[in-house]
């Protein structure tokens, strides 16, 4: 732990498929299979509360490895006291069943989510039975109203509605606010034009919400990576477009870093020209295992 503040640990930086991605035999994933140290897990946050409780944002199917990563950094109180889920897409929710009787046999975990996602949990047999068995206890948040995941944990979470493909549920970014700092967790969105209100710029939007650290959607560097796919099916603002909006970092700007990388994204390579360009502008590339004091 860092002092007595709540601490966030970044447990994954990849898009839902992870890196390397199953079925991809291109060089981008071949190199990660040859060197497992290059592999990356889907985005997730572990939060150590100021009272020693543990909390997790997103429940990926790679939670076992994410637990090992987190436990190597901090001694864990496990299972976590709370789960928070931003939306229902693969990679963000597909490990939820690991808390059930077949694996952990957990009881009484608070699960925070939107009303839309709560409806999906109730109507999906493999998840509704976990509610009936008392494994998870869903609690619906009110958007833009901060809440404590559990009493006296030393931080609050505020759900911010963010437009993103809503075939299964709506989508939210999360502001995690501690005694010293606040961190925005925003792995998914459709476009900045839909997310930003009143023609605000990205930096002004973050400042308006009093965000100090922002982890934002960096799924694709540009759409040339996936020219064989229909972009309308997987909309995300490209990093290149986001950088055009941001420009270079100025004194007093929030600390903004990109994550949720598709396996094709050149930002997964530290030595790539794209990585060097982004860093030269003063912005960041998220690192798996990074810690942030709240």
Image (cartoon, rainbow, N blue to C red):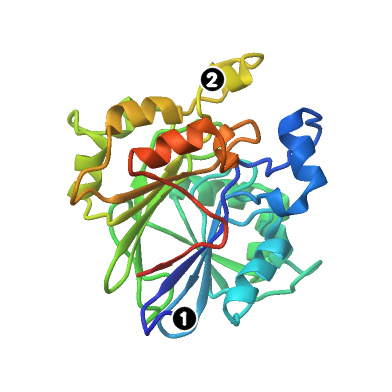
The crowd level at tag 1 (other Cα within 10 Å; few <14, some 14-19, many 20+) is: some
- Which quarter of the image is occupied by the C terminus? bottom left
Residue 179 point in image, percent of width and height: 27, 74
Write the residue at 35% across / 72% down.
Answer: 155
Counting from the top left corner in percent of width and height, residue 49 is at: 44, 77
Q: CA distance from mark 2 to mark 1?
A: 40 Å
Q: Nearer the viewer, residue 61 or 214?
A: 214
Q: Is residue 166 visible?
A: no
Question: Residue drawn at (63%, 75%), measured in percent from left and top?
Answer: 71
Q: Nearer the viewer, residue 275 or 53?
A: 275
Rate crowding at label 2 as few (under 14), some (14 to 19) or many (20 or more) other CA atoms within 10 Å: some
**Residue at numbered disc 2:** 223
As drawn, 111 above or below 171: below
Up the image or down, 157 lies above or below 168; here it is below
In the rendered view, does 28 fall on the left or right side of 200?
right
Q: Secondary structure at mark 1?
A: loop
| Res. 211 in view | yes
Q: Is 214 left, or right, of 168 in this rendering?
A: left
């Amino acid at each position: 732990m860092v002092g007595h503040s709540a601490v966030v640990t970044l447990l994954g930086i990849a898009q839902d498929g992870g890196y390397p991605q199953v079925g991809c035999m291109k060089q981008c994933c071949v190199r990660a299979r040859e060197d497992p140290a290059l592999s990356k897990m889907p985005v997730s946050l572990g939060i150590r509360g100021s009272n020693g409780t543990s909390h997790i944002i997103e429940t990926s199917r790679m939670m076992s490895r994410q637990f090992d990563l987190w436990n190597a950094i901090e001694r864990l109180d496990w299972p976590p006291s709370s789960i928070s889920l931003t939306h229902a897409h693969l990679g963000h929710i597909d490990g939820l069943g690991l808390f059930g009787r077949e694996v952990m046999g957990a009881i009484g975990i608070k699960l925070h989510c939107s009303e839309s996602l709560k409806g999906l949990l109730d109507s999906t047999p493999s998840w509704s039975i976990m509610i009936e068995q008392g494994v998870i206890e869903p609690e619906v948040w009110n958007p833009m109203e901060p809440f404590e995941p559990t009493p006296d944990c030393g931080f609050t979470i505020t759900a911010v509605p963010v437009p993103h493909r809503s075939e299964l549920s709506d989508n939210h970014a999360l502001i995690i606010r501690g005694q010293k700092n606040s961190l925005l967790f925003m792995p998914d969105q459709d476009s900045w034009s839909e997310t930003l209100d009143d023609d605000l710029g990205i930096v002004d939007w973050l400042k308006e919400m009093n965000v100090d650290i922002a982890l934002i959607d960096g799924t694709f560097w540009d759409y040339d990576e996936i020219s064989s796919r229909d972009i309308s099916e997987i909309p995300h603002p490209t990093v290149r477009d986001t950088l055009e909006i941001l420009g270079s970092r100025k004194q007093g700007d929030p600390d903004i870093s990109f994550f949720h990388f598709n396996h094709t994204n050149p930002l997964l390579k530290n030595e790539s020209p794209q990585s060097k360009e982004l860093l030269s502008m003063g912005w960041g590339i998220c690192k798996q295992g990074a810690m942030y004091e709240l």
